[in-house]
Image (tube, rainbow, N blue to C red):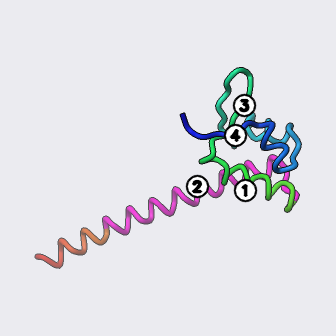
């Protein structure tokens, strides 16, 4: 089983409202595991949780803003990957024509 931390522990450690955590889960920004009615966040997802927590509490970005930012960042990563793929194809085509 993956290492994880309970929602209640996160709320104490990060001094956040439990409703904020639940809202992140409800809108799909965080994925959790549930066991015996206790919600757990996987350790590997902590950086995402910390990012949203910092943006919300430090920068005062509301939940809809977090959703928009998250979607924009996801789209940017998709575009970066597509750009890398296209550059690799272009390089392969260029290499092919240099060999002719």
**Closer to us: mark 2 or mark 1?**
1
Q: Residue 39, labelled with which disc?
A: 3
The spot of residue 28 in percent (x, y) is: 69, 38
Estimate the spatial distance between the alpha carbons at disc 4 and disc 2, rounded to whole Å: 29 Å
Q: Main secondary structure of the magenta part?
A: helix
Q: Which residue is mark 4?
A: 5
Element at badge 1? helix
Quadrant of the frame with the N terminus: top right
**Closer to us: mark 3 or mark 1?**
3
Frontmost residue, 72 versus 32: 32
Answer left or right for 54 relative to 34.
right
Q: Residue at x 82, y 50 (%)?
A: 14
Answer left or right for 11 relative to 46.
right
Q: Residues within 10 Å of mark 2 (few under 14, many from 20)?
A: few
**Closer to us: mark 1 or mark 4?**
4
Element at badge 2? helix
Estimate the spatial distance between the alpha carbons at disc 2 and disc 3, rounded to whole Å: 28 Å
Q: Residue at x 66, y 35 (%)?
A: 32
């Amino acid at each position: 089983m993956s290492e994880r931390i309970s929602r209640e522990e996160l709320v104490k450690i990060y001094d956040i409202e439990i409703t904020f955590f639940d809202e992140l889960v409800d809108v799909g920004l965080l994925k959790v595991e549930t066991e015996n009615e206790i919600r757990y966040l996987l350790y590997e997802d902590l950086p995402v949780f910390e990012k949203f927590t910092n943006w919300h509490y430090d920068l005062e970005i509301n939940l809809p803003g977090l959703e928009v930012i998250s979607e924009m960042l996801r789209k940017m990563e998709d575009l970066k990957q597509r750009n890398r793929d296209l550059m690799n194809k272009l390089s392969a085509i260029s290499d092919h024509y240099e060999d002719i």
